[in-house]
Image (spheres, rainbow, N blue to C red):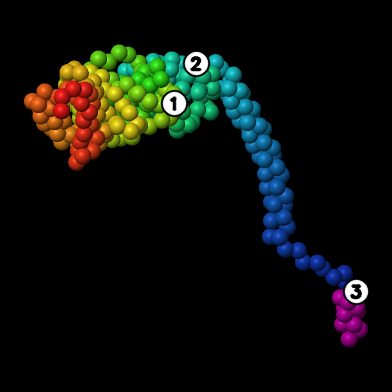
Amino acid sequence: MATRLRERRRSSTRTPAVLRDPVVVGSSERAAIQHGARRAGFGSWRVISAMIVLGLSIVLALFFAAPMFYVHNISVGGLRYLTKNEIYGLSSIADMHIFWVDPEAVRQNLLRSPTIADARVQVGWPPNMVQIIVEEREPALIWEQAGITTWIDVQGRVMSLREDRTDLVRIQAVDGDGPLGPNVQLPLDVVTGALQMKTLYPNIDVLRYDSIRGLGYQDGRGWMAWFGTGTDMPEKLLIYDAIVTNLLGRQIQPGEISVVNPDAPYYTALRGR
């Protein structure tokens, strides 16, 4: 009995034990080790990134400093009347860095010329960084007004006179406040009427234009004939020929014949009735 009591006292005076989980301790140590490894890797990547940025900066600086990347010349195709230097000036990209060249902006600059109908612009790398293909308008008439001679295309647009074209009909404006400006567009019926007259009367080299009486010409037999404008020139010319035949048959010398209005033509007589 006494022995049992002594054993109970001993057990009651023992220090309480603390149970530790070996798995938890191991995971925390591994986390600390991994964290240290990540810190070392992050630092090395920062160095690599800095080197990449530095390299790109050097390349970019060379790209903008090298003269070969600035536009000092262009390749041009499709020219007939214009010159390469004129296209270069119209493009407005002289000495511009190729990085800032906008093909559509260059195209719009070229279309400001009354001679250019359309243009295609391609931007690449040296040596042919800028390539331009232009489509020029074709002249249909030669127009003289206030001492200035210009070309007119089939749409009535004014073009700069580039060369002497004897195959084109020449029109002399008898009135007008001044020469035609580059942004002026003649009425389409004036152009079509003149082209019809040239086709029907190929021997006519010069026509005259009056803002009231339209198109006309000096008949070689001694009078002025006026035909107005529009696409009904074949009808008017038939009426004109009939009037001339009638007048000459009656020995009447006309001073002027007008078929501007084909329904009400008239003439003035220099002699005869």
Q: Distance between the residues labelled 2 and 3?
A: 101 Å
For residue 177, the mark is 1
- Residue sitting at 11 percent across and 23 percent down? 251
How far across and how far down the image is residue 175, in percent? 38, 25
Residue 72's label in the rendered image is 2
Q: Nearer the viewer, residue 38 or 193?
A: 193
Q: Earlier in the sequence, mark 2 or mark 1?
A: 2
* Crowd around label 2: few <14 · some 14–19 · many ≥20 (10 Å): some
Q: Is residue 3 visible?
A: no
| Local crowd size for mark 3, using a 10 Å CA cut-off: few (<14), some (14–19), many (≥20) | few
Foreground: disc 2 or disc 3: 2
Write the residue at 33% across / 33% down: 212
Tag nearer the camera, 2 or 1? 1
Q: Name the residue that disc number 3 marks.
A: 13
> Mark 2: which amino acid?
His
Label 1 is placed on what type of residue? Answer: Asp
Considering depth in this image, is 63 or 33 the residue closer to the camera?
63
In this orientation, which residue lies closer to the viewer: 5 or 93?
A: 93
* Helix, strand or loop: magenta stretch: helix
> What are the residue bounds of the magenta stretch?
1-13
Please give left or right for residue 193 compared with residue 243 in the image: right
Q: Say whether marks 2 and 3 touch (CB < 8 Å).
A: no
